[in-house]
Image (cartoon, helix red, strand yellow):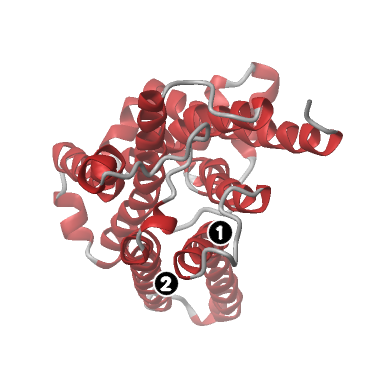
Amino acid sequence: MAGPGMIVLNTFFSCISAVTIAGNVLAIAVFAKDGKLRCTGDVYILNLAVADLMVGAISMPFTIVENIVGYWPLSQTLCKAWLLVDFTACSESVLSMVLISFDRYLQIVKPHEHRAKTFRMKLALIACTWILAFLMYGPAIILWDVLTGVSPIMVNRCEADFPLRSAAYTFTMSFLEFVVPLALLSYLYAQVYCHAIRWFRRRPSSTDSRGIQTELAKLFHRRLAVNLTVLLLVFFVCWCPYMVGTMILSQCVSCIDYYSMGFTALDWLLWANSAINPFLYAFCSPRFREGVSRLLPTCCRTQTAGHISPQPV
């Protein structure tokens, strides 16, 4: 029987899963109710919500059940299927964030190209990211035991222990799934920040309003810098510990217990990004906030519609 500490921990994990599901279901519901969102870059936010919902509704609950009973209660085939969904959804979540940043980059830096992108073109980009997300881990999960003769899945546990099998594969995947997206996000948002600042400075102003414009410029700079920094920082904090842990483990198996609760906590920190994303992306979009206000009861609409939360560019 699980001790009090494990009960508290699994209760906390269950809360994270519930928040992830609720936030992303709400984002998807808003998109489904508002056809205008399909004409904007918010379709990428919808895709992010779908990927994060898969993490909250599939990845998290099965891990909680495994923690409670102490072993994987289903077959190895279903374990492979679960791992495939988990790794693909997590990778797609990252790629969706890159798509959103690229869309904002085009909107600010190259508006003509942004306006030229049709809904079908955006869907094609989304389809490409799902294929890429699958190819990152899918073939290894499905074919690892066939090609090497050794199953990457531990008996009675559903864990893909790639770090214990191949350091080269672990480093390659960590580079592609974390380092490259982080570099792209940093570059694209740096470009967004620089061009947005230049655009704000070029705005015409009268002599009488220069003092006000200066204060507005300082506020604009600060708000933009904070918003973009938060987006990058949350991704870094959630993903970096897990990636560093797997890379250390691939070089020194005795340094970290891969099957310990400590390493499981790194998994949950990574998954927590999917719980935070709806509040960083979907609910910071004015269109989504308006949609949320329409979904809420009448007594709650006034405050929600009037609330202005920091909106990342």
Residue 75 is left or right of residue 307, and the answer is left
- The residue drawn where x is 80% and y is 35% is 8
Q: Secondary structure at mark 1?
A: helix
Q: Is residue 32 above or below residue 312?
A: above
Residue 216 is left or right of residue 50, and the answer is right
Q: Which residue is mark 1?
A: 234
Residue 193, disc: 2
Q: Residue flagged by tag 2: what amino acid is it?
A: Tyr
Q: Nearer the viewer, residue 40 or 135?
A: 135
Hey, which residue is sitting farthest front in the picture?
A: 149
- The residue drawn where x is 63% and y is 38% is 306
Whether residue 134 is visible here, answered yes or no, is: no
Q: Secondary structure at mark 2?
A: helix
Residue 23 is left or right of residue 186, and the answer is right
- The residue drawn where x is 57% and y is 71% is 216
Mark 1, mark 2: which one is toward the viewer? 1
Whether residue 35 is visible here, answered yes or no, is: yes
Q: Nearer the viewer, residue 197 or 233?
A: 233
Q: Quadrant of residue 67?
A: top right
Tally of numbered discs: 2
Q: Residue flagged by tag 1: what amino acid is it?
A: Val
